[in-house]
Amino acid sequence: MTATPAPTGVALWLAGARLRTLPAAIVPVAVGTAAAVGEGTDTEWWRAALALLVALALQVGVNYANDYSDGVRGTDGEARVGPLRLVGSGLVPAASVKRAATAAFAVAGVAGAGLALVVGPELFVVGLFCLVAGWTYTGGPRPYGYLGLGEVFVFVFFGLVATIGTTYVLLERVEPLAVWCSITVGLWATALMVTNNLRDIPGDTQAGKRTLAVRLGDAKTRDAYVLLHVVALGVALTVAATLRVGAVGALAAAPMVWLATRDVRAGASGPALIAVLGATARAQMLGGLGMTIGLAVTG
């Protein structure tokens, strides 16, 4: 069998940006925007577009930063199975990937600063925490992603902060609806991380990267993956029953959730988990779109 040639040019950088992970940035902004519908009469909706730019740039920055940090640490060795890594593959110099990460974080910082100037200085503080957390996930002297805390980062920043923050920049107050919806969104994003780390258990173990999956082991990580989806949909149904019925739209994720959890429980490993990662991203997008439409229509 002929090996697939490595991408070049723009395609190479897009591969490094890991576009499959972008639902983790899009969904919280969409849901946070929908949670604001009907809650304000003079909402400036252009702020949502700026919030989306912040989220997308932060996600891409994190992906490039992880590529750089894991690459220079030697974590992305031969045992790793998964999407192409720019530094680990030797296709792109580490310094170039570091500059790409810095540029993406700069875009997020500038867009976030624009929102802060309009909304309030508290956003400067939140933005600083986001940027620091994005870099130190696998970068710095003691990366917390190597200590099993990566899932906490994803849940907090791509769930709670991104969803609640989007509603906040639109209404300039914290809404209980956004808080509860952010839990479902964060659990979906965390499921993406768990899938990724489940696939990488052999390579991470060899490299000394103590992710949560490495700490829990294969079987318990699979149980955790299923539990994340069950709780995510359970919270969404609770929101639908108590705060806004449109949250039931999250059930649009159910078919993909069933497919992904079926494969995980059946023992999918290695390359098969790349397909599960795709199904998990599609579940997040479908559930997020369903919840967004439902919240907006019933707002």
Image: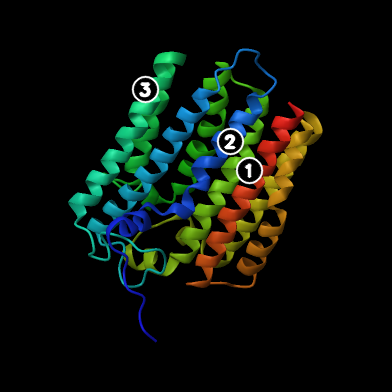
Q: In this view, does 289 lie above or below 15?
A: above
Query: Which residue occupies the foreground of this view, 222 or 263?
Result: 263
What residue is shown at x 59% (from left), y 60% (from top)?
A: 279
Question: Residue type at mark 3?
Answer: Ala
Residue 247 screen position, x and y as percent: 73, 37
- CA gap between label 2 and label 3 equals 20 Å
What residue is shown at x 31% (from left), y 59% (from top)?
A: 12
Q: In this view, does 200 lie above or below 171?
A: below
Q: In the rendered image, which quarter contains the N terminus?
A: bottom left
**Which element carries disc 2, helix, strand or loop?**
helix
Identify the residue at the far bottom of this view. 1
In the image, is 126 to the left or to the right of 106?
A: right
Which quadrant of the view contains residue 38? top right
What residue is shown at x 48% (from left), y 65% (from top)?
A: 199
- CA gap between label 1 and label 3 equals 26 Å
Residue that badge 1 annotates: 288
Q: In the rendered image, which quarter contains the C terminus?
A: top right
Among the two numbered marks 2 and 1 on one chain, the one whose residue lies closer to the N terminus: 2
Residue that badge 2 annotates: 30
Q: Which disc is residue 113 wearing? A: 3
Q: Is residue 120 visible?
A: no
Residue 28 screen position, x and y as percent: 56, 37
Mark 2 Cα-neighbour bin, 10 Å: few <14, some 14–19, many ≥20: many
Color scheme of the displayed model: rainbow
Among the two numbered marks 1 and 3 on one chain, the one whose residue lies closer to the N terminus: 3
Q: Are marks 2 and 1 in contact (CB under 8 Å)?
A: yes
What residue is shown at x 51% (from left), y 33% (from top)?
A: 162
Mark 1 Cα-neighbour bin, 10 Å: few <14, some 14–19, many ≥20: many
